[in-house]
Image: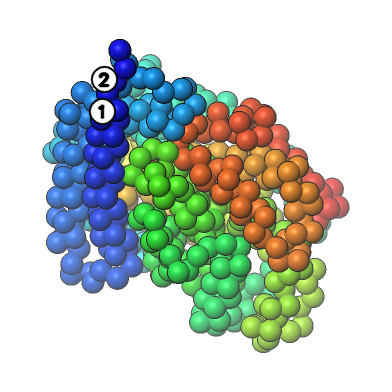
Amino acid sequence: MHASPQAYEELVTRLKKTALLSSCSAVLGWDEQTYLPPAGTELRANQLALMAGMIHEQATNPEIGNLLQELEDKSEFGDDSFEQANIREARHEYDRATKLPRRLVEELSKVATLSHHAWVDARKKNQFQDFLPWLEQMIDLKREQASAIGYQGNQAYDALLDEYEPGTTSEMIEQAFVPLRNELVALVSAIKDSGITPDISILTRKYPVEKQREFSISAAEKIGFDFNAGRLDIAAHPFCSGFGPGDCRLTTRYDEHHFPGAFFGTLHEAGHGIYEQGLSQEHFGTPVGSFTSLGIHESQSRMWENLVGRSRAFWDHFFQPAQTLFPTALADVKQEEFYRAINDVRPSFIRVEADEVTYNLHIMLRFELEKALISGDLKPADLEAVWNEKFSEYFGLTPDSSANGCLQDVHWSAGLIGYFPTYALGNMYAAHFFNAAEKDLGDLSALIAKGEFTPLKEWLNQNIHSQGKLYRANRLVEVVTGETLSHEPLIDQLQNKYSELYNL
């Protein structure tokens, strides 16, 4: 006996309907962080909570469970088929969703909206205590969510991590992070002892915001982001929202005396956007029309930001246009000086502005702290003091303000606990993928220096983006590269690049 063809078609129809409703909610969320007037916060919180409840109700309809049961019992689809992947991932999402009461889903949505605006205000004022009540409320809700979903052993954090990196546990993350951390600490120490200190004052000269915007858009467009199907706006914390085919929104933030922030932030978000625009339009609304995991998503943004955007080859192509656009700031600067400045390595407060070498240490710090928040080993009221203490241990610096410390990231205000580890995973995935692309395409530096970004973009479209959730993240790495996930490709890339820059 085979499942009826109608069963699979009905499942897909229901999944796509839920995805459309989710995309409507995403538009409201994007507007909340870009153009919503402050007085509209309470209304928007109620709107988003209502939408979250409606989406949850559709996603947990018992008929989806019945369809999945029929398809699983009598499926004729092959293990690596799009159909089987849709069934597998729909089951995973359905099982998670049905364990959560609608009340909790709506409350999480509402508190996230209100908490976000409290965070924006507290960050501006450098007042952690103003945000603390919201953090306490969010941690309680996330613990409740983890308890409802369930987890093995005593690590409630795993239930939250699974939302962003399905099938991954905190133990697996720790196993990947330990050798990576050891290698990074040694590399940072060697760079510090080199005695070489690039002139980073170049990057804090005056770079007019409108010119930054123009330059950022031209670079994002050049690497392959389609502005006919997307746009760039300003937000307190840069992000990318892919609503569906034809509509992907990027945001950034500008500082006229800090060139790297907006430029590399825009490249980063454009990397996310290129992934969103490369997803299968035919399969929109189903797992195979969705991104594999947030770690894979981050591999795309970090690749374009760092492996491409901070490469010598990239500035062989873009430095002269930069000098033309910013004559006052760059007229007397040599390309090599600029290249060394944007690749300066030194501990710093802000994660999104951190160099390639120290960046992952920021992630490890947050991973350690949010695990402790969820387990109860760290009380929210003690977060700022413990953050400052741990930051000093990791970086040899003590944050000089809440905004440069525990209030710098949006994630905890939005309830995105379990998200941070995906950034470091993304760096590791990116190194694997970049090596594999170079094997297939030849010398990527030569292509990049000539401004030829299409071959790499199309390789990513074919091998990563169009695959959707056909494979889980670790399996995708194996299929695309023939390798299992390791910290070694990333460390090799960093050591090769920075040994040359710092005479190591």
Q: Earlier in the sequence, mark 2 or mark 1?
A: 1
Q: Which residue is mark 1?
A: 7
Mark-to-mark CA distance, 2 and 1 = 8 Å
Q: Is residue 36 visible from the viewing direction of this image?
A: yes
CA neighbours of label 2 inside 10 A, class few (<14), some (14 to 19), many (20+): some
Residue that lies at the very extreme toward the top in this rendered image: 1
Type of amino acid at the residue the image marks with label 2: Glu
Residue to which mark 2 is pinned = 70
Tell me which corner region of the image, top left, top right, bottom left or bottom right, holds residue 143: top left
Q: Are marks 2 and 1 in contact (CB under 8 Å)?
A: yes
Q: Among all residues in the image, which is located at the extreme right?
A: 503
Residue 47 located left or right of residue 125? left
Which mark, by number, is residue 311?
A: none
10 Å crowding of disc 1: few (<14), some (14-19), many (20+): some
Q: Position of residue 489 (x, y in %)?
A: 71, 38
Q: Residue at x 50, y 52 (%)?
A: 278
- Percent from the top left, x then y, of residue 170? 46, 28
| Picture quadrant of residue 246 | bottom left
Q: Amino acid at mark 1?
A: Ala
Q: Is residue 35 above or below residue 106?
A: below
- Report helix, strand or loop for mark 1: helix
Q: Secondary structure at mark 2?
A: helix
